[in-house]
Image (tube, rainbow, N blue to C red):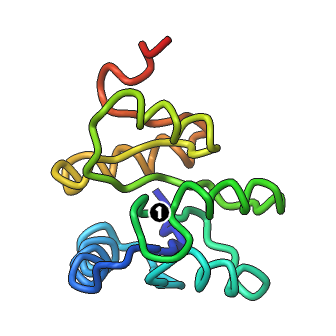
């Protein structure tokens, strides 16, 4: 896989730093934007267009669901992948309807993120096992 330009939107600084290390040093991608909330990320969208946005869901100010809906409304071309600890299927269904192209659970991020990134680049969606069976 070619190196991807990635944005990380997460309010936890230490998580962002460790995710950046994993993406750049292990997976050999480039993190071009880091934001600690949705409002700040929306301010960067005119000047940067990553291939993929890794979006936390619960953040102060504008959360990841509202931010994603706004990006979709603006026809933002990046694919958005939810990064979350939530495993409640009703909650995950809301992420799907908001416009996320996939979900990676934080507790499986090192195992699942490389697969999810590959799926998104191939035009597929990526969800944890069993999520697509939601009615």
Q: Could you say which quadrant of the image residue 80 lies in?
A: bottom right
Where disc 1 sits, the SS reads strand
Tell me: residue 108, above or below residue 31.
above
Q: How many numbered badges does the structure rendering display?
A: 1
What residue lies at 51% left-to-right and 72% top-to-bottom?
Answer: 6
| Position of residue 16 measured from the top left corner of the image (x, y, whole percent) | 31, 79
Mark 1 lies on residue:
55
| Position of residue 132 measured from the top left corner of the image (x, y, whole percent) | 44, 20
Q: Nearer the viewer, residue 1 or 23?
A: 23
Q: Could you say which quadrant of the image residue 21 lies in?
A: bottom left
What residue lies at 81% left-to-right and 56% top-to-bottom?
Answer: 73
Q: Nearer the viewer, residue 15 or 11?
A: 11
Residue that extends furthest to the front in the rendered view of this protein = 61
What residue lies at 24% left-to-right and 55% top-to-bottom?
Answer: 106
Tell me: residue 59, above or below residue 68.
below
What residue lies at 16% left-to-right and 52% top-to-bottom?
Answer: 107
Residue that extends furthest to the left in the rendered view of this protein = 107
């Amino acid at each position: 896989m070619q190196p991807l330009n990635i944005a990380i939107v997460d309010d936890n600084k230490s998580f962002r730093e460790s995710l950046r290390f994993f993406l750049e040093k292990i997976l050999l991608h480039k993190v071009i934007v880091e934001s600690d909330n949705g409002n700040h990320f929306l301010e960067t969208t005119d000047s940067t267009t990553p291939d993929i946005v890794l979006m936390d869901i619960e953040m102060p100010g504008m959360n990841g669901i509202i931010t994603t809906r706004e990006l979709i409304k603006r026809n933002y071309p990046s694919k958005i992948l939810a990064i979350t600890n939530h495993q409640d299927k009703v909650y995950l269904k809301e992420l799907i309807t908001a416009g996320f192209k996939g979900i990676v659970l934080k507790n499986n991020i090192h195992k699942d993120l490389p697969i999810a990134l590959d799926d998104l680049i191939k035009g597929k969606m990526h969800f944890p096992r069993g999520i697509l069976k939601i009615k």
